[in-house]
Image: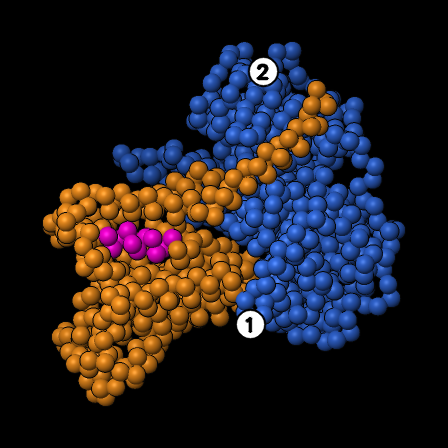
Chain colours: A blue, B orange
């Protein structure tokens, strides 16, 4: 480790309160040059607030930031950037209609003849920057930013930071929207930055990747700094129990519940970006869908739910052939779907918990089109109670709940319909460990009660831990199947990437696979 | 230390409950509506202090009521379209062209019942055209209705040669008269408000309109048929504009292609925004919009009484829309 005795950045006694909430309480942390400090904690533990203070978005109520030995005040993100501190948030701030080069040089476009943009120089500079991190072949400086993958967009943000001579770089859940393969590429860049003496702060929910990447691990809980440990002296279980403040016996508590009866039978299903898909889900069975991002798992889910048109193939639910042209058809057939992008595709953020829970049942709760309010309240109360949703009441705006609680309400929306089959697309993305554990438990309970479950996830450990059987997709087709007993990460990855195996060190930019 | 922090979340959640309970009390009165009532009182006091002797006469107040009726009816339609995330800029032209159609039917058939049906039907058709352009043509609502704003108005002028068509049927014109000293148009507004308040709040269709405006993708994935709802809402908007056209025609005792309806799109959007309807949809109430309508009606009346020049009235109306939108943006920011 390259850590020098004097920290590059030291936070001393940082506190920050919001009305009714003490977000941070006396936090002291150090980041050394050339190290990765992982920042861990459940949602609401204070990680985001801390990053916002570091970026100058918020100002601490007390405490100080000491950067290179000097106490500094970051009154705005500009101050922080000028000092060499950058925070890259989860959703990269990218102008979609502009080119990569323009995004890299926002507000500092090279000019000539007064205010005319020197386009040649701009593209040349951008190309050099991309070459510095070895991405000149994958990303063209002339590409418009919307054509980039999530990972590539993140890269542009990181490049923007590196370019301006960043000394401390904080990454907020950078891998949450990346496939494992993309994440690996990101880690290589982080290693390079480390070698150049940059101090990195890394926020993530993926414990395994953190243990492989970080030098030290700092854990926050309820706005307090609970512990900092060298990564090599700790493990996932210890970190999780520190995060939730109690021992975590077993995250994946699965028993086999699969029955004989087949609840879903799909034959030769072809739809946009998926080809000739055939599989079955039995009652009480959890079928995992693994694959790289863009492999077609979400496309399959959307086709089954009637969100995109089906071109050919048949779908049977409980042995009966069903025609699915729109979501309502799928719902009538007994299918529920929680989409991958919770905020964009499932939540009504300005509406209440009650309205979010009941939206898919309003017709059934109505007589002569008038919604029965008593039944609706009962439905929402039931969702909150059975799924342990932490909300002051059902009138609460759902946007104010944590990601985990929002997800539980979305799950409850479908459970209220007592479907035969639930399609869960990345149900644990961006939610904290505690809520994840509850969702895993819920999936097991649902299987026990005879629901068929399709479980789509990009987290290998999760797919392996939750599924009774795993189907691996690649380029819109099912590449293979693994039984729970003999599924391993290696086998799964082999199936997911079999096309790329020959060239694994430098994967190609092929359709859907993003790096 | 560890003990204390273990207790913290519980303390926080109790505080959260208390806060939410406090919220629900203000929500029942309506924080936004309370602000509007205060604004209205301030405006009334200001006008009253200048021209109280005229303003507070029952005749003037009923005048405001009659004037407000047309804006109010149209604003109900606008609010519902906006709640779904759309906008109906053509609504004033729809009123104008429908008014012409109503007057023509009276001229040719002289039957008030048929005239009413013509008003509702023509309005619905014009609204349906908007809906079709937006749902099937996939046009942006502002562009689609901006286009038909001009088209409908143009057709109105072409048919009438720019002239009003006089209506002499007294049974029909009685729609603009009074019962028990209350203008009938005001009663129509009150009845329609009641209907659509109930519709939005208590029926699944009304509730789905909020969902559609809150997040159209999520609404679709919750089984709501977006096309059907959009088509329905624009047609409904046209139908309600037809009611507005009937009121206008009876009051003017003539079919008016533009005069009397021009600017209704503007005033209805202002009323809805003032009343707290989110421009992005998903949020707002009819009650809020009605308070917005009252503010606009009172201001219009007051400016005339106080003797504000016509051109300056235009400036004031524009400023009102800008300020109302600014207030809404500030409120959103406070929340985030």
Helix, strand or loop for disc 1: loop
Q: Is residue A170 visible?
A: no
Q: Chain of mark 2?
A: A
Q: Chain of mark 1?
A: A
Can you give x and y, in whole percent of width and height, for residue B34 in the image?
38, 45
Highlighted range, magenta: B288-298
Q: Is residue A303 left or right of residue B151?
A: right
Helix, strand or loop for disc 2: strand
| Residue at 48% in and 16% down | A72
Can you give x and y, in whole percent of width and height, for residue B16 in the image?
58, 36
Can you give x and y, in whole percent of width and height, for residue B156 in the image?
21, 74
Which residue lies under the disc numbered 2?
A12
Q: Is residue A377 magenta?
A: no
Tag 2: Cα neighbours inside 10 Å, few (<14), some, or many (≥20)? some
Q: Is residue B296 magenta?
A: yes
Q: Is residue A256 visible?
A: yes
Tag 1: Cα neighbours inside 10 Å, few (<14), some, or many (≥20)? few
Q: Quadrant of the C terminus of chain A?
A: top right
Which residue lies under the disc numbered 1?
A368
| Residue at 65% in and 24% down | A224
In the picture as drawn, the residue positioned furthest to the front comes out as B180
């Amino acid at each position: 480790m390259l850590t020098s005795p004097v920290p590059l950045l030291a936070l001393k006694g940082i506190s920050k309160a919001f009305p009714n909430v003490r977000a941070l309480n006396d936090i002291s942390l150090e980041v050394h040059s050339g190290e990765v400090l992982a920042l861990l904690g459940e949602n609401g533990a204070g990680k985001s607030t801390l990053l916002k203070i570091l970026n100058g978005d918020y100002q601490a109520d007390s405490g100080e930031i000491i950067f290179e030995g000097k106490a500094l005040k970051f009154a705005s993100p500009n101050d922080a950037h000028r000092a060499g501190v950058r925070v890259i948030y989860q959703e990269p701030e990218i102008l979609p209609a502009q080119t990569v080069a323009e995004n890299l040089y926002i507000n500092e476009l090279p000019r000539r003849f007064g205010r005319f943009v020197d386009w040649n120089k701009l593209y040349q500079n951008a190309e050099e920057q991309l070459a510095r991190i070895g991405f000149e072949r994958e990303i063209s400086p002339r590409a418009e930013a919307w054509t980039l993958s999530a990972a590539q967009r993140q890269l542009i943000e990181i490049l923007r930071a590196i370019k301006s001579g960043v000394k401390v770089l904080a990454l907020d859940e950078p891998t949450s929207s990346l496939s494992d393969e993309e994440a690996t590429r990101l880690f290589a860049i982080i290693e390079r930055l480390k070698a150049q003496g940059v101090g990195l702060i890394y926020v993530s929910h993926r414990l395994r990747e953190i243990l492989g990447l970080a030098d030290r691990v700092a854990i926050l809980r309820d706005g307090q700094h609970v512990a900092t440990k060298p990564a090599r002296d700790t493990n996932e279980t210890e970190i999780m129990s520190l995060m939730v403040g109690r021992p975590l016996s077993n995250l994946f508590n699965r028993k086999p519940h699969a029955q004989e009866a087949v609840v879903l039978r799909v034959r030769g299903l072809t739809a946009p970006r998926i080809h000739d898909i055939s599989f079955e889900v039995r009652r009480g069975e959890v079928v995992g869908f693994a694959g790289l991002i863009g492999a077609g798992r979400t496309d399959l889910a959307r086709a089954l739910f009637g969100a995109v048109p089906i071109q050919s193939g048949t779908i049977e639910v409980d042995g009966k052939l069903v025609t699915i042209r729109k979501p309502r058809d799928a719902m009538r057939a007994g299918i529920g779907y929680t989409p991958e992008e919770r905020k964009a595709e499932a939540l009504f953020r300005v509406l209440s918990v009650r309205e979010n829970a009941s939206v898919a049942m309003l017709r059934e709760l109505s007589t002569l089109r008038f919604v029965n309010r008593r039944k609706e309240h009962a439905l929402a109360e039931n969702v909150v109670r059975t799924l342990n949703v932490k909300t002051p009441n059902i009138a609460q705006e759902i946007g104010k709940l944590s990601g985990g609680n929002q997800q539980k309400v979305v799950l409850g929306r479908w459970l209220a319909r007592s479907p035969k089959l639930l399609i869960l697309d990345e149900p644990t993305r961006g939610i904290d460990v505690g809520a994840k554990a509850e969702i895993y438990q819920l999936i097991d309970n649902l299987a026990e009660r005879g629901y068929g479950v399709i479980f789509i996830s990009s987290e290998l450990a999760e797919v392996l831990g939750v599924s009774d059987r795993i189907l691996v997709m690649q380029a819109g087709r099912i590449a293979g199947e693994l039984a729970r007993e003999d599924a391993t990460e290696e086998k799964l990855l082999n199936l997911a990437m079999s096309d790329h195996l020959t060239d694994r060190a430098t994967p190609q930019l092929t359709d859907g696979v993003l790096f | 230390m560890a003990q204390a922090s273990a207790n913290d979340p519980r303390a926080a959640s109790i505080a959260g409950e208390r806060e939410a309970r406090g919220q629900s009390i203000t929500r029942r009165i309506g924080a936004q509506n309370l602000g509007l009532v205060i604004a209205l009182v301030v405006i009334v006091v200001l006008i009253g202090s200048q021209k109280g002797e005229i303003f507070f006469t029952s005749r003037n107040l009923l005048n405001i009521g009659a004037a407000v009726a047309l804006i109010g009816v149209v604003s109900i339609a606008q609010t519902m379209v906006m709640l779904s995330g759309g906008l109906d800029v053509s609504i004033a032209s729809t009123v104008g062209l429908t008014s012409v159609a109503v007057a023509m039917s009276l001229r040719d058939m002289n039957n008030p019942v048929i005239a009413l049906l013509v008003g509702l039907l023509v309005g619905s058709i014009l609204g349906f055209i908007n809906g079709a352009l937006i749902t099937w043509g996939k046009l942006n609502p502002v562009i689609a209705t901006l286009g038909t704003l001009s088209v409908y108005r143009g057709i109105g002028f072409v048919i009438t040669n720019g002239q009003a068509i006089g209506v002499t049927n007294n049974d029909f014109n009685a729609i603009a008269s009074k019962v028990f000293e209350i203008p009938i148009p005001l009663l129509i507004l009150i009845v329609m408000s009641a209907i659509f308040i109930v519709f939005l709040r208590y029926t699944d269709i009304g509730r789905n309109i909020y969902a559609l405006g809150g997040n159209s993708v999520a609404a679709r994935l919750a089984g709501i048929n977006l096309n059907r709802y959009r088509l329905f809402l624009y047609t409904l908007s046209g139908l309600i504009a037809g009611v507005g056209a009937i009121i206008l025609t009876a009051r003017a005792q003539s079919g008016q292609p533009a005069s009397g309806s021009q600017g209704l799109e503007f005033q209805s959007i202002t009323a809805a925004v003032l009343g707290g309807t989110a421009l992005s949809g998903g949020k707002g109430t009819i009650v809020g919009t009605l308070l917005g309508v009252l503010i606009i009606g009172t201001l219009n009346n007051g400016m005339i009484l106080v003797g504000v020049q016509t051109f300056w009235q235009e400036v004031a109306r524009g400023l009102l829309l800008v300020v109302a939108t600014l207030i809404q943006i500030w409120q959103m920011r406070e929340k985030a």
